[in-house]
Image (cartoon, rainbow, N blue to C red):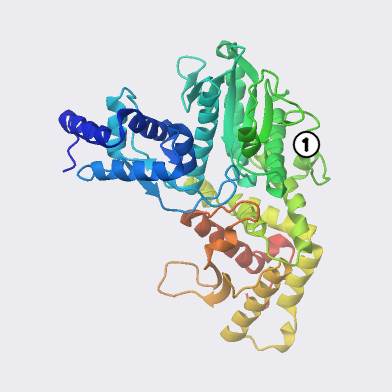
Amino acid sequence: MNDLSLERIEQLRQAVDVQIGESIRKKVLHTLAITGVASNQQLIQAAGLQRDKLRRTLEKMAAAASDYPPLFSIYNSKLKRGAEPGPSSRVYRLGESGAALCRADGLENTRPCQLEDARAVRHALGMLDVHLAARQAGLQVKTDRNLYYNDTDFIRPDNLVTLPDGKQVILESEQDANSDFLERIRRSLINKIDFFKSDASADVLIEIRMLVDLPRGKFWQHTLSIWRHAIEITQEAYGADLPFRLLALPLGEFLDKPDWNGEPDPYRWTDLTSGDAGLILTKSEPLAKAALQMPAFSNLERRMVLAALLQHLRESSCLARQTHPDVEFLYLMRMIYLASHDPFAPALSRSGMPFESLYLLDQYLKMNPSLRQIVEGTTQMDARRIHWNQSTCLHRMQVVVDRFLEYHGWQSNGPLLAYSHTVDYQSRSPRRFSVSVEITNPEIMIAEEIAVMPGKQEIEFLEKSLTWVLTAIFAYTHHLGLKKPPFW
Protein backbone atom coordinates (compact mmCIF):
# COMPACT_ATOMS: atom_id res chain seq x y z
CA MET A 1 0.00 0.00 0.00
CA ASN A 2 2.49 2.59 -1.18
CA ASP A 3 -0.01 4.91 -2.88
CA LEU A 4 0.51 8.45 -1.54
CA SER A 5 -2.53 10.15 -2.99
CA LEU A 6 -3.81 13.30 -1.31
CA GLU A 7 -6.46 11.24 0.43
CA ARG A 8 -3.90 8.76 1.78
CA ILE A 9 -1.60 11.57 2.92
CA GLU A 10 -4.46 13.14 4.85
CA GLN A 11 -5.29 9.81 6.45
CA LEU A 12 -1.66 9.37 7.46
CA ARG A 13 -1.50 12.89 8.90
CA GLN A 14 -4.58 12.23 11.04
CA ALA A 15 -3.22 8.88 12.23
CA VAL A 16 0.09 10.38 13.31
CA ASP A 17 -1.48 13.46 14.92
CA VAL A 18 -3.82 11.28 16.99
CA GLN A 19 -0.80 9.49 18.42
CA ILE A 20 1.58 12.38 19.15
CA GLY A 21 -0.15 15.66 18.28
CA GLU A 22 0.26 17.99 15.32
CA SER A 23 2.82 20.25 16.99
CA ILE A 24 5.29 17.46 17.83
CA ARG A 25 4.81 15.82 14.44
CA LYS A 26 5.72 19.08 12.67
CA LYS A 27 8.72 19.74 14.92
CA VAL A 28 10.16 16.29 14.18
CA LEU A 29 9.48 16.10 10.44
CA HIS A 30 10.15 19.76 9.69
CA THR A 31 13.52 19.46 11.42
CA LEU A 32 14.38 16.45 9.26
CA ALA A 33 13.25 18.40 6.19
CA ILE A 34 15.85 21.16 6.67
CA THR A 35 18.82 19.09 5.42
CA GLY A 36 17.24 15.63 5.11
CA VAL A 37 18.91 14.26 8.24
CA ALA A 38 18.97 14.92 11.97
CA SER A 39 20.71 13.29 14.90
CA ASN A 40 18.92 12.14 18.02
CA GLN A 41 20.42 15.09 19.91
CA GLN A 42 19.27 17.58 17.28
CA LEU A 43 15.71 16.24 17.39
CA ILE A 44 15.75 16.52 21.18
CA GLN A 45 16.80 20.16 20.82
CA ALA A 46 14.24 20.97 18.10
CA ALA A 47 11.25 19.12 19.59
CA GLY A 48 11.94 20.06 23.21
CA LEU A 49 11.58 16.43 24.36
CA GLN A 50 13.64 14.35 26.74
CA ARG A 51 15.54 11.40 25.22
CA ASP A 52 13.09 8.70 26.37
CA LYS A 53 10.09 10.80 25.36
CA LEU A 54 11.56 11.33 21.90
CA ARG A 55 12.23 7.61 21.51
CA ARG A 56 8.60 6.76 22.37
CA THR A 57 7.38 9.51 20.03
CA LEU A 58 9.36 8.14 17.09
CA GLU A 59 8.13 4.62 17.82
CA LYS A 60 4.51 5.85 17.79
CA MET A 61 5.09 7.71 14.52
CA ALA A 62 6.58 4.62 12.88
CA ALA A 63 3.71 2.45 14.11
CA ALA A 64 1.08 4.88 12.82
CA ALA A 65 2.72 4.79 9.37
CA SER A 66 3.24 1.01 9.25
CA ASP A 67 1.00 0.68 6.15
CA TYR A 68 2.78 3.50 4.32
CA PRO A 69 6.28 4.16 3.01
CA PRO A 70 8.46 5.15 5.99
CA LEU A 71 8.21 8.57 7.62
CA PHE A 72 11.93 8.33 8.36
CA SER A 73 14.71 5.75 8.42
CA ILE A 74 17.75 5.19 10.62
CA TYR A 75 21.16 5.78 9.05
CA ASN A 76 23.02 2.57 9.84
CA SER A 77 26.66 3.60 9.39
CA LYS A 78 28.55 4.65 12.49
CA LEU A 79 29.26 8.38 12.63
CA LYS A 80 31.58 10.23 14.98
CA ARG A 81 31.51 14.00 14.92
CA GLY A 82 33.77 16.59 16.50
CA ALA A 83 30.75 18.72 17.47
CA GLU A 84 29.18 15.88 19.49
CA PRO A 85 31.60 14.54 22.12
CA GLY A 86 30.92 11.14 23.59
CA PRO A 87 29.25 8.14 21.92
CA SER A 88 27.92 8.48 18.39
CA SER A 89 24.35 9.77 18.22
CA ARG A 90 21.72 7.93 16.19
CA VAL A 91 20.96 9.66 12.89
CA TYR A 92 17.57 9.71 11.13
CA ARG A 93 16.83 10.39 7.46
CA LEU A 94 13.58 11.81 6.12
CA GLY A 95 11.52 9.15 4.33
CA GLU A 96 9.01 9.25 1.50
CA SER A 97 5.91 9.62 3.69
CA GLY A 98 7.66 12.16 5.92
CA ALA A 99 8.51 14.29 2.89
CA ALA A 100 4.90 14.02 1.64
CA LEU A 101 3.54 15.27 4.98
CA CYS A 102 6.01 18.17 4.93
CA ARG A 103 4.87 19.16 1.43
CA ALA A 104 1.26 19.01 2.64
CA ASP A 105 2.29 21.41 5.42
CA GLY A 106 3.55 23.91 2.83
CA LEU A 107 7.23 22.91 2.59
CA GLU A 108 6.86 22.51 -1.16
CA ASN A 109 10.34 21.41 -2.22
CA THR A 110 10.82 18.76 0.45
CA ARG A 111 12.16 15.46 -0.87
CA PRO A 112 13.12 12.17 0.81
CA CYS A 113 16.75 12.05 1.90
CA GLN A 114 19.03 10.22 -0.55
CA LEU A 115 22.30 10.74 1.33
CA GLU A 116 24.36 7.57 1.79
CA ASP A 117 27.98 8.72 2.01
CA ALA A 118 29.09 9.29 5.60
CA ARG A 119 30.88 12.53 4.75
CA ALA A 120 27.77 13.96 3.09
CA VAL A 121 25.65 13.00 6.10
CA ARG A 122 28.08 14.66 8.53
CA HIS A 123 28.04 17.79 6.37
CA ALA A 124 24.23 17.89 6.45
CA LEU A 125 24.28 17.46 10.25
CA GLY A 126 26.74 20.34 10.53
CA MET A 127 24.45 22.62 8.51
CA LEU A 128 21.52 21.66 10.74
CA ASP A 129 23.56 22.44 13.88
CA VAL A 130 24.01 26.03 12.72
CA HIS A 131 20.40 26.36 11.56
CA LEU A 132 19.08 25.26 14.97
CA ALA A 133 21.51 27.53 16.81
CA ALA A 134 20.40 30.54 14.74
CA ARG A 135 16.75 29.73 15.24
CA GLN A 136 17.27 29.31 18.99
CA ALA A 137 18.80 32.81 19.03
CA GLY A 138 15.70 34.18 17.28
CA LEU A 139 17.55 34.90 14.04
CA GLN A 140 16.31 34.43 10.50
CA VAL A 141 18.24 31.71 8.66
CA LYS A 142 18.17 30.24 5.17
CA THR A 143 19.81 26.83 4.82
CA ASP A 144 21.17 25.38 1.58
CA ARG A 145 19.37 27.89 -0.66
CA ASN A 146 20.54 29.43 -3.94
CA LEU A 147 21.76 33.01 -3.61
CA TYR A 148 21.75 34.58 -7.10
CA TYR A 149 24.07 37.41 -8.08
CA ASN A 150 22.83 37.64 -11.68
CA ASP A 151 20.16 35.99 -13.80
CA THR A 152 21.92 32.63 -14.04
CA ASP A 153 24.81 32.47 -11.58
CA PHE A 154 24.51 31.79 -7.89
CA ILE A 155 26.29 30.50 -4.82
CA ARG A 156 24.64 28.12 -2.37
CA PRO A 157 25.68 28.97 1.20
CA ASP A 158 25.23 26.26 3.79
CA ASN A 159 23.56 28.89 5.99
CA LEU A 160 22.74 32.56 5.41
CA VAL A 161 21.91 34.19 8.74
CA THR A 162 20.47 37.66 9.34
CA LEU A 163 22.33 39.08 12.35
CA PRO A 164 20.75 41.27 15.04
CA ASP A 165 22.04 44.41 13.28
CA GLY A 166 20.20 43.44 10.07
CA LYS A 167 23.30 42.42 8.12
CA GLN A 168 23.52 38.96 6.62
CA VAL A 169 26.49 36.61 7.03
CA ILE A 170 27.44 33.38 5.26
CA LEU A 171 28.30 30.42 7.49
CA GLU A 172 29.81 27.38 5.81
CA SER A 173 30.05 23.95 7.43
CA GLU A 174 33.28 22.04 6.71
CA GLN A 175 35.08 18.89 7.79
CA ASP A 176 38.63 17.60 7.74
CA ALA A 177 40.48 18.24 4.48
CA ASN A 178 43.59 17.01 2.72
CA SER A 179 45.27 17.97 -0.53
CA ASP A 180 42.76 15.97 -2.55
CA PHE A 181 40.26 18.74 -1.76
CA LEU A 182 42.39 21.58 -3.15
CA GLU A 183 40.60 21.81 -6.48
CA ARG A 184 37.13 21.74 -4.92
CA ILE A 185 38.13 24.41 -2.39
CA ARG A 186 39.64 26.55 -5.14
CA ARG A 187 36.44 26.39 -7.23
CA SER A 188 34.40 27.34 -4.16
CA LEU A 189 36.63 30.36 -3.51
CA ILE A 190 36.35 31.51 -7.14
CA ASN A 191 32.55 31.37 -6.95
CA LYS A 192 32.64 33.43 -3.75
CA ILE A 193 34.90 36.00 -5.45
CA ASP A 194 32.34 36.45 -8.22
CA PHE A 195 29.56 36.87 -5.68
CA PHE A 196 31.36 39.45 -3.54
CA LYS A 197 32.27 41.47 -6.65
CA SER A 198 28.57 41.76 -7.53
CA ASP A 199 25.90 44.18 -6.29
CA ALA A 200 24.00 41.27 -4.73
CA SER A 201 26.52 41.18 -1.87
CA ALA A 202 25.67 44.71 -0.66
CA ASP A 203 23.70 43.47 2.35
CA VAL A 204 26.09 40.60 3.16
CA LEU A 205 29.13 40.97 5.41
CA ILE A 206 32.32 40.70 3.36
CA GLU A 207 33.42 37.64 5.24
CA ILE A 208 32.64 33.94 5.36
CA ARG A 209 32.54 32.21 8.71
CA MET A 210 33.66 28.60 8.35
CA LEU A 211 32.68 26.14 11.08
CA VAL A 212 34.86 23.03 10.96
CA ASP A 213 33.57 19.83 12.54
CA LEU A 214 36.91 19.08 14.21
CA PRO A 215 38.38 19.80 17.64
CA ARG A 216 41.57 21.83 17.81
CA GLY A 217 44.62 19.65 17.30
CA LYS A 218 46.65 18.00 14.55
CA PHE A 219 43.76 17.49 12.12
CA TRP A 220 42.44 21.01 12.74
CA GLN A 221 45.84 22.53 11.93
CA HIS A 222 46.29 20.32 8.87
CA THR A 223 42.84 21.20 7.52
CA LEU A 224 43.43 24.93 7.93
CA SER A 225 46.81 24.63 6.19
CA ILE A 226 45.08 23.02 3.17
CA TRP A 227 42.60 25.92 3.04
CA ARG A 228 45.48 28.39 3.35
CA HIS A 229 47.26 26.74 0.39
CA ALA A 230 44.05 26.94 -1.66
CA ILE A 231 43.76 30.65 -0.83
CA GLU A 232 47.35 31.24 -1.99
CA ILE A 233 46.69 29.42 -5.27
CA THR A 234 43.48 31.39 -5.85
CA GLN A 235 45.13 34.72 -5.05
CA GLU A 236 47.92 34.03 -7.54
CA ALA A 237 45.39 33.25 -10.26
CA TYR A 238 43.13 36.16 -9.24
CA GLY A 239 46.07 38.57 -9.10
CA ALA A 240 44.95 40.20 -5.85
CA ASP A 241 43.78 39.50 -2.32
CA LEU A 242 40.36 37.90 -1.99
CA PRO A 243 37.52 40.44 -1.72
CA PHE A 244 36.34 38.80 1.51
CA ARG A 245 37.70 37.40 4.75
CA LEU A 246 37.57 33.68 5.53
CA LEU A 247 37.29 33.01 9.26
CA ALA A 248 37.47 29.55 10.84
CA LEU A 249 36.29 28.18 14.18
CA PRO A 250 35.66 24.62 15.45
CA LEU A 251 31.95 23.86 15.18
CA GLY A 252 31.84 22.47 18.71
CA GLU A 253 33.25 25.70 20.17
CA PHE A 254 30.73 27.75 18.21
CA LEU A 255 27.78 25.67 19.42
CA ASP A 256 28.96 25.97 23.03
CA LYS A 257 29.01 29.77 22.67
CA PRO A 258 27.43 31.02 19.41
CA ASP A 259 28.93 34.24 18.06
CA TRP A 260 26.33 36.34 16.24
CA ASN A 261 28.20 39.64 16.48
CA GLY A 262 28.68 41.81 13.43
CA GLU A 263 32.41 41.77 14.19
CA PRO A 264 33.40 38.26 15.35
CA ASP A 265 35.72 37.78 18.32
CA PRO A 266 39.28 37.81 16.86
CA TYR A 267 40.55 35.73 19.79
CA ARG A 268 38.26 32.85 18.82
CA TRP A 269 38.25 32.95 15.02
CA THR A 270 41.26 32.24 12.77
CA ASP A 271 41.45 34.58 9.77
CA LEU A 272 42.78 32.40 6.95
CA THR A 273 42.96 35.34 4.54
CA SER A 274 45.27 37.25 6.86
CA GLY A 275 48.99 37.28 6.17
CA ASP A 276 49.50 35.75 9.62
CA ALA A 277 46.82 33.14 10.15
CA GLY A 278 48.56 31.67 13.18
CA LEU A 279 48.99 28.26 11.52
CA ILE A 280 51.73 25.85 12.46
CA LEU A 281 53.30 25.21 9.06
CA THR A 282 56.54 23.53 8.13
CA LYS A 283 59.10 25.95 6.72
CA SER A 284 59.23 25.64 2.96
CA GLU A 285 59.99 27.67 -0.12
CA PRO A 286 57.38 30.20 -1.23
CA LEU A 287 54.65 28.80 -3.43
CA ALA A 288 55.68 30.90 -6.42
CA LYS A 289 59.31 29.72 -6.18
CA ALA A 290 58.23 26.09 -5.91
CA ALA A 291 56.04 26.57 -8.99
CA LEU A 292 59.05 27.71 -11.03
CA GLN A 293 60.85 24.47 -10.13
CA MET A 294 58.01 22.33 -11.40
CA PRO A 295 58.21 20.88 -14.92
CA ALA A 296 56.20 22.82 -17.47
CA PHE A 297 52.76 21.26 -17.75
CA SER A 298 49.73 22.43 -19.67
CA ASN A 299 48.97 25.68 -17.82
CA LEU A 300 49.82 27.92 -14.89
CA GLU A 301 46.95 26.65 -12.80
CA ARG A 302 48.18 23.06 -13.04
CA ARG A 303 51.65 24.13 -11.92
CA MET A 304 50.24 25.99 -8.93
CA VAL A 305 48.15 23.04 -7.84
CA LEU A 306 51.13 20.71 -8.12
CA ALA A 307 53.26 23.24 -6.25
CA ALA A 308 50.79 23.15 -3.38
CA LEU A 309 50.92 19.35 -3.45
CA LEU A 310 54.71 19.54 -3.34
CA GLN A 311 54.53 21.80 -0.30
CA HIS A 312 52.20 19.32 1.37
CA LEU A 313 54.62 16.51 0.58
CA ARG A 314 57.32 18.44 2.40
CA GLU A 315 55.07 18.86 5.40
CA SER A 316 54.32 15.14 5.38
CA SER A 317 57.97 14.05 5.17
CA CYS A 318 57.97 13.75 8.96
CA LEU A 319 56.16 10.43 8.40
CA ALA A 320 59.55 8.90 7.73
CA ARG A 321 60.60 9.49 11.34
CA GLN A 322 57.60 7.75 12.85
CA THR A 323 57.71 4.21 14.21
CA HIS A 324 53.95 3.66 14.28
CA PRO A 325 51.61 3.48 11.29
CA ASP A 326 49.85 6.71 10.40
CA VAL A 327 46.76 6.79 8.20
CA GLU A 328 48.11 10.00 6.63
CA PHE A 329 50.63 7.80 4.78
CA LEU A 330 47.79 6.22 2.80
CA TYR A 331 46.35 9.61 1.89
CA LEU A 332 49.83 10.76 0.87
CA MET A 333 50.08 7.82 -1.54
CA ARG A 334 46.58 8.67 -2.77
CA MET A 335 47.65 12.24 -3.47
CA ILE A 336 50.66 11.07 -5.52
CA TYR A 337 48.47 8.69 -7.52
CA LEU A 338 45.65 11.18 -8.01
CA ALA A 339 47.96 13.71 -9.69
CA SER A 340 47.81 11.66 -12.93
CA HIS A 341 44.84 9.38 -12.31
CA ASP A 342 41.93 11.69 -11.64
CA PRO A 343 38.85 9.54 -12.45
CA PHE A 344 37.05 12.66 -13.69
CA ALA A 345 39.81 13.65 -16.14
CA PRO A 346 39.16 13.20 -19.89
CA ALA A 347 39.82 9.68 -21.20
CA LEU A 348 42.61 10.92 -23.49
CA SER A 349 44.38 12.53 -20.55
CA ARG A 350 44.12 9.32 -18.52
CA SER A 351 45.66 7.38 -21.44
CA GLY A 352 48.97 9.23 -21.28
CA MET A 353 52.08 8.59 -19.23
CA PRO A 354 51.55 9.46 -15.53
CA PHE A 355 54.24 12.14 -15.49
CA GLU A 356 52.71 14.20 -12.68
CA SER A 357 52.45 11.18 -10.37
CA LEU A 358 55.98 10.09 -11.25
CA TYR A 359 57.29 13.58 -10.60
CA LEU A 360 55.73 13.70 -7.14
CA LEU A 361 56.93 10.18 -6.30
CA ASP A 362 60.44 11.13 -7.42
CA GLN A 363 60.31 14.26 -5.25
CA TYR A 364 59.11 12.22 -2.29
CA LEU A 365 62.02 9.79 -2.67
CA LYS A 366 64.43 12.74 -2.89
CA MET A 367 62.94 14.21 0.28
CA ASN A 368 63.54 10.85 1.96
CA PRO A 369 66.99 9.77 0.72
CA SER A 370 67.19 6.91 3.22
CA LEU A 371 63.98 5.47 1.74
CA ARG A 372 65.43 5.78 -1.77
CA GLN A 373 68.56 3.98 -0.57
CA ILE A 374 66.48 1.21 1.04
CA VAL A 375 64.42 0.64 -2.11
CA GLU A 376 67.40 0.58 -4.47
CA GLY A 377 69.70 -1.34 -2.14
CA THR A 378 67.12 -4.05 -1.40
CA THR A 379 66.23 -4.41 -5.09
CA GLN A 380 69.88 -4.79 -6.20
CA MET A 381 71.16 -6.88 -3.26
CA ASP A 382 73.19 -9.90 -4.48
CA ALA A 383 71.67 -9.39 -7.95
CA ARG A 384 74.58 -10.96 -9.82
CA ARG A 385 74.74 -14.10 -7.67
CA ILE A 386 71.05 -15.01 -7.86
CA HIS A 387 69.50 -17.22 -10.51
CA TRP A 388 66.32 -15.30 -11.21
CA ASN A 389 63.19 -17.33 -11.72
CA GLN A 390 59.55 -16.57 -10.96
CA SER A 391 59.81 -17.52 -7.29
CA THR A 392 62.96 -15.52 -6.58
CA CYS A 393 61.58 -12.50 -8.47
CA LEU A 394 58.34 -12.47 -6.47
CA HIS A 395 60.24 -13.00 -3.23
CA ARG A 396 62.56 -10.07 -3.95
CA MET A 397 59.61 -7.83 -4.86
CA GLN A 398 57.92 -8.80 -1.59
CA VAL A 399 61.05 -7.94 0.39
CA VAL A 400 61.20 -4.49 -1.25
CA VAL A 401 57.48 -3.92 -0.56
CA ASP A 402 57.99 -4.98 3.07
CA ARG A 403 60.92 -2.59 3.52
CA PHE A 404 59.02 0.31 1.90
CA LEU A 405 56.07 -0.18 4.28
CA GLU A 406 58.32 -0.80 7.28
CA TYR A 407 59.98 2.56 6.66
CA HIS A 408 56.55 4.16 7.20
CA GLY A 409 55.68 2.05 10.25
CA TRP A 410 53.47 -0.50 8.49
CA GLN A 411 53.69 -4.24 7.90
CA SER A 412 52.45 -6.03 4.80
CA ASN A 413 50.54 -8.91 6.42
CA GLY A 414 48.29 -7.10 8.87
CA PRO A 415 45.00 -5.24 8.32
CA LEU A 416 46.94 -3.57 5.48
CA LEU A 417 47.80 -6.47 3.17
CA ALA A 418 50.37 -5.95 0.38
CA TYR A 419 51.79 -8.78 -1.70
CA SER A 420 53.58 -9.49 -4.98
CA HIS A 421 52.07 -11.91 -7.47
CA THR A 422 51.86 -12.85 -11.11
CA VAL A 423 48.86 -11.76 -13.12
CA ASP A 424 46.11 -14.10 -14.18
CA TYR A 425 47.00 -14.66 -17.81
CA GLN A 426 43.31 -14.94 -18.65
CA SER A 427 42.76 -11.37 -17.49
CA ARG A 428 42.97 -8.35 -19.76
CA SER A 429 45.93 -6.59 -18.13
CA PRO A 430 49.67 -6.13 -18.76
CA ARG A 431 51.65 -9.38 -18.48
CA ARG A 432 54.13 -8.51 -15.75
CA PHE A 433 54.81 -9.09 -12.08
CA SER A 434 52.33 -7.18 -9.99
CA VAL A 435 51.68 -5.84 -6.49
CA SER A 436 48.25 -5.83 -4.85
CA VAL A 437 47.05 -4.01 -1.75
CA GLU A 438 43.99 -4.80 0.35
CA ILE A 439 42.69 -2.98 3.43
CA THR A 440 41.15 -5.96 5.22
CA ASN A 441 40.04 -3.99 8.28
CA PRO A 442 38.71 -0.46 7.54
CA GLU A 443 39.12 0.52 11.20
CA ILE A 444 42.77 1.35 10.48
CA MET A 445 41.39 4.41 8.63
CA ILE A 446 39.85 5.93 11.77
CA ALA A 447 41.89 8.94 12.90
CA GLU A 448 42.81 9.46 16.55
CA GLU A 449 40.96 12.68 17.25
CA ILE A 450 37.73 11.96 15.38
CA ALA A 451 36.39 8.55 14.39
CA VAL A 452 35.50 8.81 10.71
CA MET A 453 35.02 5.58 8.77
CA PRO A 454 35.61 6.12 5.04
CA GLY A 455 33.22 4.59 2.52
CA LYS A 456 33.91 1.53 0.36
CA GLN A 457 34.73 3.63 -2.71
CA GLU A 458 37.32 5.72 -0.85
CA ILE A 459 38.96 2.59 0.59
CA GLU A 460 39.19 1.01 -2.87
CA PHE A 461 40.83 4.17 -4.24
CA LEU A 462 43.38 4.16 -1.38
CA GLU A 463 44.19 0.51 -2.17
CA LYS A 464 44.62 1.34 -5.85
CA SER A 465 46.86 4.32 -5.01
CA LEU A 466 49.29 2.37 -2.84
CA THR A 467 49.26 -0.46 -5.39
CA TRP A 468 50.37 1.98 -8.09
CA VAL A 469 53.16 3.46 -5.97
CA LEU A 470 54.53 0.04 -4.96
CA THR A 471 54.43 -1.09 -8.60
CA ALA A 472 56.00 2.14 -9.87
CA ILE A 473 59.22 1.59 -7.88
CA PHE A 474 59.81 -1.44 -10.13
CA ALA A 475 58.15 -0.43 -13.40
CA TYR A 476 59.24 3.22 -13.69
CA THR A 477 62.81 3.17 -12.36
CA HIS A 478 64.03 5.14 -15.40
CA HIS A 479 61.74 8.04 -14.37
CA LEU A 480 62.67 7.83 -10.69
CA GLY A 481 66.43 7.74 -11.03
CA LEU A 482 66.65 4.19 -9.66
CA LYS A 483 68.64 1.31 -11.06
CA LYS A 484 66.55 -1.10 -13.10
CA PRO A 485 65.68 -4.31 -11.20
CA PRO A 486 67.60 -7.26 -12.63
CA PHE A 487 64.37 -9.26 -12.96
CA TRP A 488 62.25 -6.59 -14.68
Q: Mark 1 Cα within 10 Å, few/some/many (few <14, many 20+)?
A: some
Q: Is residue 104 above or below residue 412?
A: above
Who is closer to the viewer here, 131 or 330? Answer: 131
Note whether residue 235 is visible.
yes
425 vs 379, left or right, is left
Residue 118, given in percent of the width and then of the height, sits at: 48, 48
373 vs 88, left or right, is right
Q: Which quarter of the image is occupied by the C terminus?
A: bottom right
Q: Is residue 475 above or below residue 235?
A: below
Q: Is residue 266 above or below residue 1?
A: above
Q: Please report the residue visible at 35 percent of the width from the left and 43 percent of the height from the top.
A: 58
Residue 88, given in percent of the width and then of the height, sits at: 52, 51
Name the amino acid, label 1: Ala
Residue for badge 1: 288
Who is closer to the viewer here, 88 or 222? Answer: 88
Who is closer to the viewer here, 486 or 360? Answer: 360
Q: Quadrant of residue 190?
A: top right
Q: Please report the residue visible at 44 percent of the width from the left and 75 percent of the height from the top.
A: 425
Q: Please report the residue visible at 65 percent of the width from the left and 45 percent of the height from the top.
A: 179
Note whether residue 157 is visible.
no
Residue 297, given in percent of the width and then of the height, sits at: 66, 42
Q: Quadrant of residue 186?
A: top right
Q: Is residue 252 above or below residue 347?
A: above
Label 1's element? helix
Q: Which quarter of the image is occupied by the N terminus?
A: top left
